[in-house]
Amino acid sequence: MAEAGLDSTKVDAFGDRLLGILNDATLALMISVGHRTGLFDVLGKLPPASCEDIAKTAGLAERYVREWLGAMVTGSVVTYDADSKTYALPAEHAALLTREAAPDNFAVFAQYVSVLGGVEDQIVECFQNGGGVPYSAFPRFHKVMAEESYQTVVSSLEAHILPIAEGLVKQLETGIDVLDIGCGSGRALHRLAKSFPSSRFSGYDLSPDAVEKAEADARQDGLTNLRFEQKDLTQWNETENYDLVTAFDAIHDQAKPSVVLSGIHRVLRPGGTFLMQDIRMSSHLENNLDNPIGPFIYTISCMHCMTVSLAQGGDGLGAAWGEELATQMLKEAGFSTVEVHRLEHDIQNNFYLMKK
């Protein structure tokens, strides 16, 4: 019962919303499990099937699959026929939950819930004592980030992203030197190195594990025009070595973003291009109230992007640094003109184009 002076209708409405949040949060965990175990992919190909048949096809333990299906059915993700005791994933749901649905597979993003939940204790300590949580505390983050990057960036490189810079594809075909900042496991560079064998590609990342994975993949595919290096970009003194620098969802994570941006301007040759993808947010909270993924971005920022920067003694810029601050910092780094591009199919990102 609501206390005196409270609007009971509003209390009840907010209680209903909180109940929905609890259900949806736990569903997100189960959606992550469904993605990682391949259950959505199996269901996407099967006709209505029993739990036993689903588990057998997926090669999984039936008892766990049965409980997972319970969550999926009560969460209105999977349908259930009580008479035949069969389960089905509607085609309209499969279109947003299977690997074949990429780049529209929401299950990839659901993995962030469990990844971030794994550092909740450390984040609470940071609330109490300050400081940050280091990259090493996120053992699966780079793997999940690489999968997301494949959906949002790699799959769109040739068709949507590279054409933002007029003439860039032709330059890559002829042969130029390219650097990717915060390359992670190198999926974007891997794709570019395959597509443009006349160009030379380098990737820098702070994580030695990510660089090791990137190097192994390059060796496996015999890509001799691709190299990776573990590097702390707060101490970076190269000059005019590259014609193109890219940064895909990486600048806001840096300990010293302004230092990195100045280094990018310095490392570009005259006439060179900097292409930066970063989160589509405003620097002002009041402008983000209608952002459809606002809570998602602020949560990832608090529990990863901001904290890993603070753990390095950095600025803690965060994923929600926003278009206004990004534009200001790019100009302060030496780029006189900053173009901001938005792709019709991508609600999450801005693409910034700068020339030296």
Image (spheres, grey):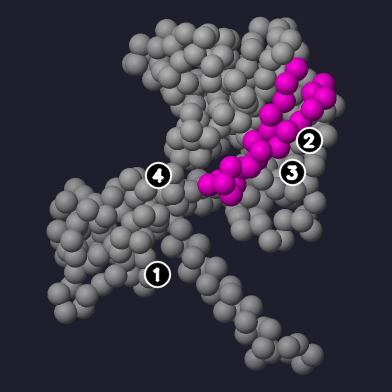
- Position of 28 compared to 5: left or right? left
Amino acid tagged 1:
Gly
Residue nearest the viewer, comparing 65 with 199: 199
Q: Residues within 10 Å of mark 1 (few under 14, many from 20)?
A: some
Task: Return the disc, 3 or 4, that comes first in the chain's sequence.
Answer: 4
At 34% from the left and 16% from the top, the residue drawn is 221
- Dot 3: what SS? helix
Residues at discs 3 and 1 in contact (Cβ within 8 Å)? no
Question: What percent of the width, then of the height, locates residue 110?
Answer: 47, 52
Q: State the separation of the CA atoms marked 2 and 1.
A: 42 Å
Closest to the camera, between mark 2 and mark 1, is 2
Ranked by sequence position, the earlier of labels 2 and 3 is 3
Secondary structure type for disc 4:
loop
Q: Is residue 341 magenta?
A: yes
Residue, x 70% and y 41% (percent of image)?
Answer: 318
User: Magenta region: which residues?
Assistant: 333-356
Amino acid at circle 3: Gly
Neighbour class for label 3 at 10 Å: few (<14), some, many (≥20)? Answer: many
What residue sits right under mark 4 in the picture? 102
Q: Earlier in the sequence, mark 4 or mark 2?
A: 4
Query: Which label sits on residue 327?
Result: 2
Quarter of the image where one finds residue 135: top right
Q: Is residue 252 visible?
A: no
Spatial CA distance of label 3 from label 4 is 27 Å
Asked if labels 2 and 4 touch by Cβ distance under 8 angstroms, the answer is no
Q: Nearer the viewer, mark 3 or mark 1?
A: 3
